[in-house]
Amino acid sequence: MKLRFASIIDWNDSIYEGKIASVVYLAGCPLRCPWCYSGALVTAPSECSSEKPVEFFLNHLAKQRDKCNAVVFTGGEPCEQENALAELCAKLRGEGFAVKIETSGYYPEALAGLIPNIDFVSLDIKTRFEQDDYAKACGFKGNAELLVSNVLRSIAFLETRGAQYGVEWEARTTVVPQLNDDAQIIREIARHAKNASAYALQALETQDREFVDAGFAQNASEPSREKMLELAAAAKEVLAALGGNTNVIVRMKNAEAKI
Ligand code: SF4
Protein backbone atom coordinates (compact mmCIF):
# COMPACT_ATOMS: atom_id res chain seq x y z
CA MET A 1 0.00 0.00 0.00
CA LYS A 2 1.08 3.58 -0.67
CA LEU A 3 0.86 6.87 1.19
CA ARG A 4 0.63 10.30 -0.42
CA PHE A 5 3.02 12.68 1.30
CA ALA A 6 4.87 15.95 0.83
CA SER A 7 7.83 15.76 3.22
CA ILE A 8 9.41 14.21 6.29
CA ILE A 9 11.22 16.34 8.85
CA ASP A 10 13.26 14.47 11.44
CA TRP A 11 14.36 15.30 14.97
CA ASN A 12 11.52 17.58 16.06
CA ASP A 13 11.53 18.01 19.84
CA SER A 14 8.43 20.21 20.19
CA ILE A 15 5.57 18.48 18.40
CA TYR A 16 5.16 15.51 20.76
CA GLU A 17 5.82 16.30 24.41
CA GLY A 18 8.71 14.34 25.86
CA LYS A 19 9.66 12.79 22.51
CA ILE A 20 12.03 13.39 19.63
CA ALA A 21 9.92 12.82 16.55
CA SER A 22 10.10 12.41 12.82
CA VAL A 23 7.19 14.37 11.35
CA VAL A 24 5.52 13.00 8.21
CA TYR A 25 3.42 15.53 6.28
CA LEU A 26 0.70 13.60 4.48
CA ALA A 27 -1.05 15.27 1.55
CA GLY A 28 -4.76 15.79 1.01
CA CYS A 29 -7.52 17.27 3.18
CA PRO A 30 -11.29 17.56 2.69
CA LEU A 31 -11.35 20.96 4.48
CA ARG A 32 -10.09 24.40 3.44
CA CYS A 33 -9.66 26.36 6.68
CA PRO A 34 -8.96 29.91 5.40
CA TRP A 35 -6.14 30.35 7.91
CA CYS A 36 -4.49 27.00 7.16
CA TYR A 37 -0.72 27.34 6.75
CA SER A 38 -0.44 24.07 4.84
CA GLY A 39 -1.97 25.17 1.55
CA ALA A 40 0.44 23.08 -0.45
CA LEU A 41 -0.67 20.01 1.47
CA VAL A 42 -4.43 20.25 1.28
CA THR A 43 -4.83 19.71 -2.45
CA ALA A 44 -3.66 16.33 -3.61
CA PRO A 45 -2.38 14.99 -5.83
CA SER A 46 -0.27 18.06 -6.55
CA GLU A 47 3.23 18.91 -7.64
CA CYS A 48 4.20 19.11 -3.94
CA SER A 49 3.22 15.53 -3.18
CA SER A 50 4.14 12.04 -4.27
CA GLU A 51 3.12 8.49 -3.40
CA LYS A 52 5.49 6.01 -1.80
CA PRO A 53 4.95 2.51 -0.47
CA VAL A 54 4.78 1.83 3.26
CA GLU A 55 8.26 0.26 3.04
CA PHE A 56 9.73 3.60 1.92
CA PHE A 57 8.61 5.23 5.18
CA LEU A 58 9.70 2.25 7.27
CA ASN A 59 13.17 2.33 5.73
CA HIS A 60 13.57 6.05 6.27
CA LEU A 61 12.24 6.02 9.83
CA ALA A 62 14.25 2.95 10.83
CA LYS A 63 17.37 4.99 10.06
CA GLN A 64 16.23 7.63 12.57
CA ARG A 65 15.53 5.12 15.33
CA ASP A 66 18.72 5.91 17.30
CA LYS A 67 17.76 9.62 17.43
CA CYS A 68 13.95 9.59 17.30
CA ASN A 69 11.57 7.68 19.55
CA ALA A 70 8.33 8.85 17.92
CA VAL A 71 6.66 9.50 14.59
CA VAL A 72 4.00 12.19 14.10
CA PHE A 73 1.63 12.10 11.15
CA THR A 74 0.21 15.46 10.25
CA GLY A 75 -1.03 17.07 7.10
CA GLY A 76 -3.21 17.60 5.43
CA GLU A 77 -5.55 15.07 6.99
CA PRO A 78 -3.78 11.80 7.88
CA CYS A 79 -7.02 9.85 8.41
CA GLU A 80 -7.84 10.29 4.71
CA GLN A 81 -5.33 7.49 4.07
CA GLU A 82 -6.52 5.16 6.78
CA ASN A 83 -5.60 1.74 5.40
CA ALA A 84 -2.00 2.42 4.44
CA LEU A 85 -1.53 4.54 7.55
CA ALA A 86 -2.86 1.76 9.82
CA GLU A 87 -0.36 -0.68 8.29
CA LEU A 88 2.50 1.77 8.76
CA CYS A 89 1.51 2.71 12.32
CA ALA A 90 1.30 -0.95 13.37
CA LYS A 91 4.77 -1.62 11.96
CA LEU A 92 6.26 1.51 13.53
CA ARG A 93 4.98 0.54 16.95
CA GLY A 94 6.47 -2.89 16.39
CA GLU A 95 9.80 -1.07 15.90
CA GLY A 96 9.34 0.70 19.23
CA PHE A 97 8.21 4.13 18.00
CA ALA A 98 5.42 6.02 19.75
CA VAL A 99 2.91 7.26 17.15
CA LYS A 100 0.95 10.50 17.20
CA ILE A 101 -1.67 11.69 14.72
CA GLU A 102 -2.93 15.24 14.18
CA THR A 103 -6.44 15.30 12.76
CA SER A 104 -9.45 17.50 12.06
CA GLY A 105 -11.76 14.67 13.12
CA TYR A 106 -13.48 14.64 9.73
CA TYR A 107 -13.12 10.86 9.37
CA PRO A 108 -14.37 9.32 12.66
CA GLU A 109 -14.45 5.70 11.46
CA ALA A 110 -10.92 5.98 10.11
CA LEU A 111 -9.75 7.42 13.42
CA ALA A 112 -11.49 4.60 15.29
CA GLY A 113 -9.74 2.10 13.02
CA LEU A 114 -6.34 3.66 13.73
CA ILE A 115 -6.76 3.82 17.50
CA PRO A 116 -5.33 0.34 18.29
CA ASN A 117 -2.06 1.33 16.60
CA ILE A 118 -1.45 4.84 17.88
CA ASP A 119 -0.49 6.45 21.19
CA PHE A 120 -1.57 10.07 20.99
CA VAL A 121 -4.06 12.18 19.02
CA SER A 122 -4.28 15.95 18.61
CA LEU A 123 -7.84 16.72 17.55
CA ASP A 124 -8.66 20.15 16.18
CA ILE A 125 -11.89 21.76 17.35
CA LYS A 126 -12.08 24.80 15.12
CA THR A 127 -14.96 26.65 16.78
CA ARG A 128 -18.25 25.98 18.60
CA PHE A 129 -20.44 23.25 17.14
CA GLU A 130 -22.87 25.49 15.27
CA GLN A 131 -23.14 24.20 11.72
CA ASP A 132 -22.69 27.54 9.92
CA ASP A 133 -19.87 28.66 12.21
CA TYR A 134 -18.05 25.37 11.89
CA ALA A 135 -18.37 25.24 8.10
CA LYS A 136 -17.11 28.83 7.86
CA ALA A 137 -14.11 28.08 10.08
CA CYS A 138 -13.26 25.11 7.85
CA GLY A 139 -13.96 26.85 4.53
CA PHE A 140 -16.24 23.87 3.96
CA LYS A 141 -18.83 23.98 1.19
CA GLY A 142 -20.29 20.51 1.73
CA ASN A 143 -22.79 19.14 4.25
CA ALA A 144 -22.22 21.19 7.43
CA GLU A 145 -24.41 18.89 9.53
CA LEU A 146 -22.21 15.95 8.55
CA LEU A 147 -19.05 17.95 9.25
CA VAL A 148 -20.14 18.78 12.81
CA SER A 149 -21.43 15.29 13.42
CA ASN A 150 -18.15 13.77 12.20
CA VAL A 151 -16.04 15.84 14.58
CA LEU A 152 -18.34 15.05 17.51
CA ARG A 153 -18.19 11.34 16.67
CA SER A 154 -14.40 11.51 16.55
CA ILE A 155 -14.44 12.95 20.06
CA ALA A 156 -16.79 10.17 21.16
CA PHE A 157 -14.47 7.52 19.69
CA LEU A 158 -11.50 9.00 21.54
CA GLU A 159 -13.47 9.03 24.79
CA THR A 160 -14.55 5.39 24.46
CA ARG A 161 -12.38 3.31 22.14
CA GLY A 162 -9.39 5.58 22.78
CA ALA A 163 -9.70 5.05 26.53
CA GLN A 164 -10.03 1.30 25.96
CA TYR A 165 -6.68 1.25 24.11
CA GLY A 166 -4.95 3.77 26.38
CA VAL A 167 -4.69 6.43 23.69
CA GLU A 168 -4.04 9.88 25.10
CA TRP A 169 -5.58 12.87 23.30
CA GLU A 170 -5.60 16.62 23.39
CA ALA A 171 -8.22 18.94 21.96
CA ARG A 172 -6.71 21.89 20.16
CA THR A 173 -8.04 25.20 18.88
CA THR A 174 -6.16 27.68 16.73
CA VAL A 175 -7.25 31.08 17.98
CA VAL A 176 -8.11 33.23 14.96
CA PRO A 177 -9.16 36.86 15.57
CA GLN A 178 -12.72 37.59 14.42
CA LEU A 179 -13.42 33.89 14.00
CA ASN A 180 -13.21 32.28 17.43
CA ASP A 181 -11.30 34.65 19.78
CA ASP A 182 -14.28 34.98 22.07
CA ALA A 183 -14.47 33.69 25.63
CA GLN A 184 -17.99 32.32 25.16
CA ILE A 185 -16.97 30.37 22.04
CA ILE A 186 -13.93 28.95 23.83
CA ARG A 187 -16.11 27.98 26.81
CA GLU A 188 -18.42 26.05 24.49
CA ILE A 189 -15.49 24.28 22.86
CA ALA A 190 -13.85 23.48 26.20
CA ARG A 191 -16.91 21.50 27.30
CA HIS A 192 -16.02 18.93 24.65
CA ALA A 193 -12.45 18.66 25.93
CA LYS A 194 -13.38 17.53 29.43
CA ASN A 195 -12.17 13.97 28.83
CA ALA A 196 -9.02 14.97 26.95
CA SER A 197 -5.67 14.99 28.71
CA ALA A 198 -5.33 18.66 27.77
CA TYR A 199 -6.97 21.50 25.90
CA ALA A 200 -4.49 23.53 23.86
CA LEU A 201 -5.06 27.03 22.52
CA GLN A 202 -2.59 27.97 19.83
CA ALA A 203 -2.31 31.49 18.48
CA LEU A 204 -2.64 32.12 14.78
CA GLU A 205 0.71 33.17 13.34
CA THR A 206 0.74 35.52 10.40
CA GLN A 207 4.41 36.26 9.85
CA ASP A 208 5.88 34.59 6.76
CA ARG A 209 2.76 32.47 6.35
CA GLU A 210 0.91 31.69 3.18
CA PHE A 211 -2.73 30.98 3.89
CA VAL A 212 -5.08 28.74 1.94
CA ASP A 213 -7.38 31.73 1.41
CA ALA A 214 -5.37 34.61 -0.01
CA GLY A 215 -8.23 37.02 0.86
CA PHE A 216 -8.00 35.99 4.51
CA ALA A 217 -4.33 37.03 4.58
CA GLN A 218 -5.14 40.67 3.85
CA ASN A 219 -6.90 41.20 7.19
CA ALA A 220 -5.28 38.47 9.25
CA SER A 221 -3.91 39.39 12.67
CA GLU A 222 -2.47 37.49 15.62
CA PRO A 223 -4.26 37.31 18.97
CA SER A 224 -2.49 39.19 21.77
CA ARG A 225 -0.91 37.45 24.74
CA GLU A 226 -3.59 39.02 26.97
CA LYS A 227 -6.35 37.62 24.78
CA MET A 228 -4.79 34.15 24.83
CA LEU A 229 -4.58 34.23 28.63
CA GLU A 230 -8.18 35.45 28.89
CA LEU A 231 -9.37 32.58 26.69
CA ALA A 232 -7.25 30.06 28.60
CA ALA A 233 -8.78 31.24 31.89
CA ALA A 234 -12.28 30.84 30.43
CA ALA A 235 -11.49 27.31 29.26
CA LYS A 236 -9.98 26.38 32.60
CA GLU A 237 -13.03 27.63 34.47
CA VAL A 238 -15.35 25.45 32.37
CA LEU A 239 -13.17 22.36 32.68
CA ALA A 240 -12.89 22.80 36.45
CA ALA A 241 -16.67 23.18 36.75
CA LEU A 242 -17.18 19.97 34.76
CA GLY A 243 -14.72 18.10 36.98
CA GLY A 244 -12.66 17.25 33.91
CA ASN A 245 -8.97 17.54 33.22
CA THR A 246 -7.95 21.16 33.74
CA ASN A 247 -4.70 21.09 31.79
CA VAL A 248 -4.96 24.12 29.55
CA ILE A 249 -2.01 24.89 27.31
CA VAL A 250 -1.26 28.16 25.54
CA ARG A 251 1.00 28.03 22.49
CA MET A 252 2.42 31.19 20.94
CA LYS A 253 5.38 31.48 18.57
CA ASN A 254 6.87 28.08 19.34
CA ALA A 255 6.61 28.73 23.10
CA GLU A 256 4.26 26.82 25.32
CA ALA A 257 2.81 27.55 28.76
CA LYS A 258 0.64 25.34 30.93
CA ILE A 259 -2.07 27.38 32.62
S1 SF4 B 1 -5.91 23.43 8.99
FE1 SF4 B 1 -7.83 22.82 7.97
S2 SF4 B 1 -7.38 22.81 5.77
FE2 SF4 B 1 -5.41 22.84 6.85
S3 SF4 B 1 -4.81 20.71 7.00
FE3 SF4 B 1 -5.89 21.20 8.90
S4 SF4 B 1 -8.04 20.67 8.53
FE4 SF4 B 1 -7.01 20.74 6.51
Image (cartoon, rainbow, N blue to C red):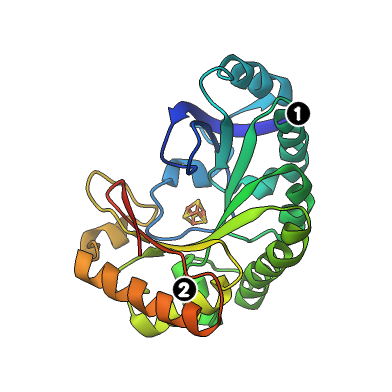
Residue at which label 1 appears: 94
Is residue 101 something one can see in this rendering?
A: yes
Residue at which label 2 appears: 127
From the viewer's perspective, tell me whether residue 180 is left or right of residue 64.
Answer: left
Q: In this view, does 245 lie above or below 96?
A: below
Q: Which residue is drawn at 75% across and 66% down?
A: 160
From the viewer's perspective, tell me whether residue 228 is left or right of residue 147.
Answer: left
Query: Would the CB of label 1 be found within 8 Å of ligand 1?
Result: no
Q: Residue at x 51, y 47 (%)?
A: 42
| Type of amino acid under label 2 | Thr
Q: Residue 161 carries which label?
A: none
> In which quadrant of the rendered view does residue 227 lie?
bottom left
Q: Which residue is drawn at 38% across and 49% down?
A: 37
First-in-chain label (2 vs 1): 1
Image position, residue 155 (x, y; %): 65, 67
Image position, residue 181 (x, y; %): 32, 74
| Type of amino acid under label 1 | Gly
Pointer 1 local density, CA inside 10 Å: few below 14, some 14–19, many at least 20: few
Q: In this view, does 2 lie above or below 44?
A: above
Pointer 2 local density, CA inside 10 Å: few below 14, some 14–19, many at least 20: many
Callout 2: SS? loop
The quarter of the picture where the C terminus appears is bottom left
